[in-house]
Every structure is written in C-alpha cells, then in structure tokens.
Amino acid sequence: MRIDIITLFPEMFEGPFSESIVKRAHQKGLVDIHLHQLRAFTADKHRKVDDYAFSGGAGMVMMIRPVAK
C-alpha cells in the first residue's frame, strides 16, 4: 500500500514512522510512505501556501492552488 502525505512539516512524521508499527510494516514491504512538502507545489518565490479568510473573520486558510497541484 502506498501512502502519500502532503504537509508543511514532513520532518514531524519521520520520528513516529521510524519508531512504531508503521516502521515494521515498512520493513516487511506492506506499506510505502512518501512525505511531500506542500511548499514544493507553490509558484511564487516566497513559497506561500496560506491565504486570508474571505469571510473577513480571523485566521488563515490554505490556498487551493498548491493543494490542487
């Protein structure tokens, strides 16, 4: 089984995946995990992935272009 995880913090997953039941599954060839940096899919020079909420409320939201790409 192939699992692709797209995240802003791929290094956050390296610890749990190298010390858990997932590690044993990977060693047995049952699972293949690929971590992807979301910023790698952006087009601007600042690698921006967040945008302002269109409702005018507080907080930030993810831009659709990097996620859809």
Image (spheres, rainbow, N blue to C red):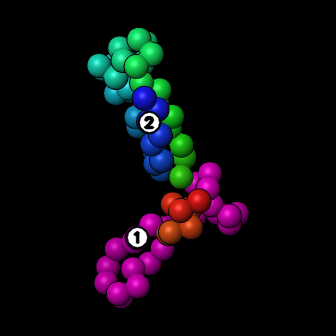
Does residue 40 lie above or below 53 as drawn?
A: above
* Furthest residue toward top: 28
Q: Work out which quarter of the rendered image holds the N terminus and state it.
A: top left
Percent position (x, y) of residue 45? 70, 63
Whole-percent x, y for residue 6 in the image: 48, 47
Number of marks in the rendered image = 2
Q: Are marks 2 and 1 in contact (CB under 8 Å)?
A: no
Q: Is residue 4 above or below residue 18?
A: below
Amino acid type at mark 2: Ile
**Does residue 53 appear in this view?**
yes
The magenta segment: 39-62
Front residue of this view, candidates 31 and 58:
31
**Position in image of residue 23 (x %, y %):** 37, 18
- State the image coordinates of residue 13 (x, y, percent, origin top left): 40, 34
Q: Is residue 11 visible?
A: no
Q: Residue at x 39, y 72 (%)?
A: 60
C-alpha gap between disc 2 and disc 1: 24 Å
Element carrying mark 2: strand
**Quarter occupied by the C terminus:** bottom right
Badge nearest the viewer, 2 or 1: 2
In magenta segment, residue 42: yes
Circle 2 residues within 10 Å: few <14, some 14–19, many ≥20: few
SS type, badge 1:
strand
Query: Which amino acid lies under the numbered mark 1 shown in the image of this protein?
Result: Val
Q: Residue at x 61, y 56 (%)?
A: 41
Give whichever of discs 2 and 1 has the lower sequence position. 2
Q: What residue do we see at 62% from left, 51% from top?
A: 40
Question: Magenta includes 32?
Answer: no
Quickly name the residue at label 1: 61
Left or right side of 35 for 12: left
**Label 2: which residue?**
3
